[in-house]
């Protein structure tokens, strides 16, 4: 029993320990290597870091519930781009011309609906065809990206609404709007996954699908709901980011699915499903962003950042495997 | 007792699978408050019958009556709603979730907004666990429990419903003696509440201890029901086997040579203990026992797929260390695995490539594989084993089961092994090819190979073996010579009777 709790502690605590390590390392290394005079752990720098974590963070939280459920969603990056275009484009549509600033909530709702519908399409295909979610969303990733290019060709879609920009740049209690969204999404989904029947059933489906079916859980609807949630979150992430930037390139959001999955895995969620932690994913997102920012701080370029993150991911998965192996051998004796 | 009306009646159940008549008009009934044992050899149809009852299979003919009303079990949920609870032999639990969540899987109590009512859940599961004398709480993670305790969780699941019929499928397979006592108490309590219990077990001793009636299936057909109090183990055994003793094993003339393989005191965790035996050149040693007795695990250990914790393996009198299949092959041990399609063959590859797979690196000319040498080997073994395939280019997946098995055997023979281990040599093979494989094994023994055959089919073991090792619960109970073995004594030995019960 005590072994079990230690293992759990290591599992859930590892990512936070890693974050602390990063903070110490970059603070110390930054003092020698950094070209700027600012300390790495400067408050403004940290607040900015949280804000920058939001776009991938919001998606990663959604990816966690998909992966706990035993699926995966590769189409989130494309969904993100499509929702962004709907957001910016719809504000210029003639039918909304008389709305003034009321066009903002309308555009938001349209963008979020886009995400929900795209997610539902994924979920229903996975449910009804029984094809693996990896394949289904690989196809929809290509398909949705195709739609993005059909909307506006290679051209960026741009529209700046200054009220919206003000909202997006606002700070409340020091935290940026995007940060608040990330925190809210994290807390709500943590609650859903740990406290609601839907959340627990999703765990059961990912853990042992046959047992779930035998117990009379309707697997399909739970899967669809989770895909709708991640579609919604991909769109929400776009809404939060593009409210401020006001311009979307057709290639935006590419590789977001991989960054999200990386954060989820770093946060301790099992690739095979059944076990995972929303809070852990939040930690994973922060850890990745710290690494990017920190390496930038000490003068490394983007390529180095990607290499280091790749190495760390392999190290984490290896450690996780060792940890689990040990656990099983102990059980056997 | 006879005047009581049955709570559950199965009438003329027929279930066919492609090519197999798994159940052939089976009748069965359970009265309230009785424990009714269902017995039969492996593959007799017990599990299929219970799956029909639990709505996991639909019968082709026949009907199910509960309280004299016909019901249709379309799925496991319908069965549950009709008061039929099946406690699975293979545990069906979500490992990363808590005991409480598993016990109420699919039926978590709710509050407003779809929230889980944890308090009710904990209270109800806590009460049930206390009733079962479990020493773990509702919040324990399933993955941290032993198999026996997981079994208790499965049983706890049954107690959450007002069950009319509870099916225990091999419930004691992984329980210790003290846990068995608890289980039998639970069964008695259920009996008092008027629940009808179907008890599936291979173990005569406990069957006689706790059941009221015993029904026997053989080859998918109902063979009769006996009152436990009025029958004997021999009578039940006889019904199960259904034949008079088959003593025509004299054909197994062995030309036994020197000892090829010796195993001494081999143990591996709780899978098997203290296993010692010899295999001589030119003889077949059959390993017989129930599923889970540890036979396959011994084979896997000899082939380097598992590590043993104690003991020695000696080949030609020299001790060898085998930690991987590569080392096993290098030492001359070959394994024809239990499941041909998953472990033995690359189904999409042709006959020649499958047969030469393990030795392909020895058949090279420069950097290239010599196709000609491969064909020579294939043709040689095709002739010797009488493999019926159109050509060496035929895709193995298109061959019959018997010919597929010959390809696997040929593959390992072409490696010139000292010891050949064959696990379930005729699983999924039709009757005609079965005897061909049996004859082939005998011939190979005649040519001086040392062979171990693992089988769950008694006629097969009796037919091919020179000696038979009877296993129960990870231990060797007895070793028989072909001359002295009888079906009764063999069944006794593998049921754990007359020997020390290997409670962990």
Image (tube, coloured by chain):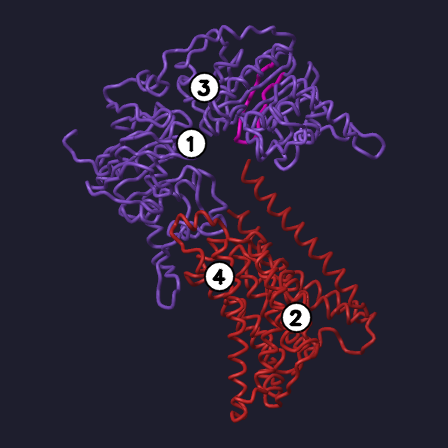
- Which chain does the purple colour mark? B
Q: Residue at x 60, y 64 (%)?
A: A75
Of the pair B116 and A258, the residue shown nearer to us: A258
Q: Secondary structure at mark 1?
A: loop
Q: Position of residue B210 (x, y in %)?
A: 29, 29
Tell me which secondary structure the magenta stretch mostly adopts.
strand
* Mark 4 closeness class: few <14, some 14–19, many ≥20 residues within 10 Å: some
Query: Between marks 3 and 2, how big is the CA–CA gap?
Result: 63 Å
The residue beneath circle 3 is B458
Q: Is residue B21 left or right of residue A94?
A: left
* Residue B278 belongs to the span the image colors magenta: yes
- Badges 2 and 4: C-beta atoms under 8 Å apart? no
Q: Is residue B7 left or right of residue B23?
A: left
Subunit bearing disc 1: B
Q: Residue at x 43, y 52 (%)?
A: B139
Of the pair B351 and B446, the residue shown nearer to us: B351
Instruction: Using the image, determine if residue B454 lies above or below residue A265.
Output: above
Q: Residue furthest right?
A: B366
The residue beneath circle 2 is A253
- Badges 1 and 4: C-beta atoms under 8 Å apart? no
Query: Between marks 2 and 4, how big is the CA–CA gap?
Result: 23 Å
Of the pair A125 and B316, the residue shown nearer to us: A125
Q: Which mark is residue B173?
A: 1
The residue beneath circle 4 is A124
Quarter where residue A154 is shown: bottom right
Q: Which stretch appears magenta?
A: B262-279
Q: Secondary structure at mark 2?
A: loop
- Which chain does the red colour mark? A
Subunit bearing disc 4: A
Q: Quadrant of the N terminus of chain B?
A: top left
């Amino acid at each position: 029993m005590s072994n079990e709790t230690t293992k759990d502690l290591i599992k859930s605590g590892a990512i936070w320990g890693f974050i602390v390590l990063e903070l110490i390392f970059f603070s110390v290394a930054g003092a020698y290597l950094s070209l700027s005079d600012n300390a790495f752990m400067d408050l403004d720098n940290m607040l900015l870091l949280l804000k920058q974590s939001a776009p991938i963070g919001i998606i990663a939280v959604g990816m966690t519930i998909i992966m706990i459920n035993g699926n995966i969603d590769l189409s989130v990056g494309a969904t993100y781009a499509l929702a962004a275009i709907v957001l910016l484009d719809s504000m210029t549509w003639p039918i909304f011309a008389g709305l003034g600033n009321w066009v903002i909530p309308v555009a938001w709702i349209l963008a979020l609906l886009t995400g929900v519908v795209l997610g539902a399409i994924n979920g229903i295909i996975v449910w009804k065809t029984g094809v693996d979610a990896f394949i289904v969303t690989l196809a929809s990733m290509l398909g949705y990206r195709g739609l993005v290019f059909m909307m506006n060709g290679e051209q960026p879609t741009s529209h700046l609404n200054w009220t919206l920009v003000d909202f997006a740049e606002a700070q409340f209690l020091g935290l940026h709007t995007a940060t608040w969204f990330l925190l809210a999404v994290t807390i709500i989904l943590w609650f859903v996954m740990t406290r609601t029947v839907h959340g627990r059933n999703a765990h059961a489906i990912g853990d042992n699908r046959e047992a779930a079916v035998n117990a009379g859980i309707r697997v399909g609807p739970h899967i669809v709901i989770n895909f709708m949630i991640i579609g919604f979150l991909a769109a929400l992430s776009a809404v939060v980011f593009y409210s401020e930037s006001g311009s979307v390139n057709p290639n935006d959001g590419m590789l977001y699915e991989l960054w999200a999955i990386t954060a989820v895995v770093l946060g301790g969620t099992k690739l095979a499903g059944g076990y995972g932690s929303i809070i852990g994913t939040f930690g994973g997102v922060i850890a990745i962003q710290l690494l990017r920012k920190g390496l930038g701080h000490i003068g490394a370029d983007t390529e180095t950042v990607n290499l280091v993150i790749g190495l760390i991911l392999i190290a984490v998965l290896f450690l996780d495997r060792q940890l689990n192996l040990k656990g099983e051998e102990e059980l056997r004796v | 007792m006879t005047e009581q009306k049955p709570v559950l009646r199965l009438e003329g159940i027929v279930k066919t699978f492609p090519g197999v008549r798994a159940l052939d008009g089976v009748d069965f009934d359970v009265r309230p408050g009785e424990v009714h044992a269902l017995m039969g050899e492996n593959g007799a149809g017990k599990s299929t019958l219970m799956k029909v009852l639990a709505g996991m299979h639909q019968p082709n003919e026949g009907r199910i009556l509960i309280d004299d009303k016909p019901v249709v079990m379309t799925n496991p949920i319908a069965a549950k709603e009709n008061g039929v609870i099946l406690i699975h032999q293979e545990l069906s639990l979500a490992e990363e979730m808590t005991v409480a969540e598993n016990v109420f899987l699919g039926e978590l109590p709710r509050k407003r907004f779809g929230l889980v009512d944890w308090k009710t859940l904990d209270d109800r599961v806590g009460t049930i666990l206390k009733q079962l004398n479990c020493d773990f709480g509702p919040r324990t993670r399933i993955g941290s429990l032993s198999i026996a305790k997981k079994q208790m969780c499965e049983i706890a699941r049954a107690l959450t419903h007002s069950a009319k019929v509870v099916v225990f499928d091999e419930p004691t397979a992984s329980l210790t003696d003290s846990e068995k006592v608890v289980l039998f108490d639970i069964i008695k309590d259920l009996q008092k509440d008027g629940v009808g219990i179907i008890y599936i077990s291979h173990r005569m001793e406990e069957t006689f201890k706790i059941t009221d009636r015993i029904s026997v299936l053989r080859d998918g057909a109902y063979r009769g029901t006996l009152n436990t109090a009025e029958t004997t183990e021999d009578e039940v055994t006889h019904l199960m086997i259904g034949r008079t003793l088959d003593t025509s094993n004299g054909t197994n003339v062995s030309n036994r040579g020197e000892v090829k393989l010796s195993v001494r005191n081999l143990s591996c965790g709780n899978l098997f203990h203290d296993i010692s035996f010899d295999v001589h050149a030119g003889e077949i040693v059959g390993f017989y026992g129930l599923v889970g007795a540890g036979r396959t695990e011994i084979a896997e250990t000899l082939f380097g797929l598992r590590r043993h914790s104690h003991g020695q393996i000696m080949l030609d009198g020299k001790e060898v260390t085998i930690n991987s299949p590569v080392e096993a092959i290098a030492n001359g041990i070959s394994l024809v695995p239990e499941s041909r399609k998953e472990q033995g063959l690359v189904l999409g590859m042709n006959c020649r490539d499958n047969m030469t797979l393990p030795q392909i690196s020895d058949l090279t000319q420069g950097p290239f594989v010599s196709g000609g040498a491969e064909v020579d080997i294939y043709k040689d073994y095709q002739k010797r084993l009488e493999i019926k395939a159109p050509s060496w280019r035929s895709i193995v997946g298109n061959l019959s089961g018997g010919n597929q098995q010959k390809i696997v055997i040929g593959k390992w023979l072409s490696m010139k092994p000292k010891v050949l281990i064959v696990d379930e040599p005729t699983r999924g093979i039709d009757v005609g090819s079965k005897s061909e494989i049996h004859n082939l094994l005998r011939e190979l023994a005649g040519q001086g190979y040392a062979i171990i055959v693992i089988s769950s089919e008694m006629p097969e073991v009796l037919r091919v073996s020179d000696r038979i090792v009877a296993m129960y619960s990870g231990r060797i109970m007895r070793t028989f010579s072909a001359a002295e073995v009888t079906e009764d004594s063999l069944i006794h030995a593998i049921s754990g009777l007359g020997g020390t019960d290997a409670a962990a």
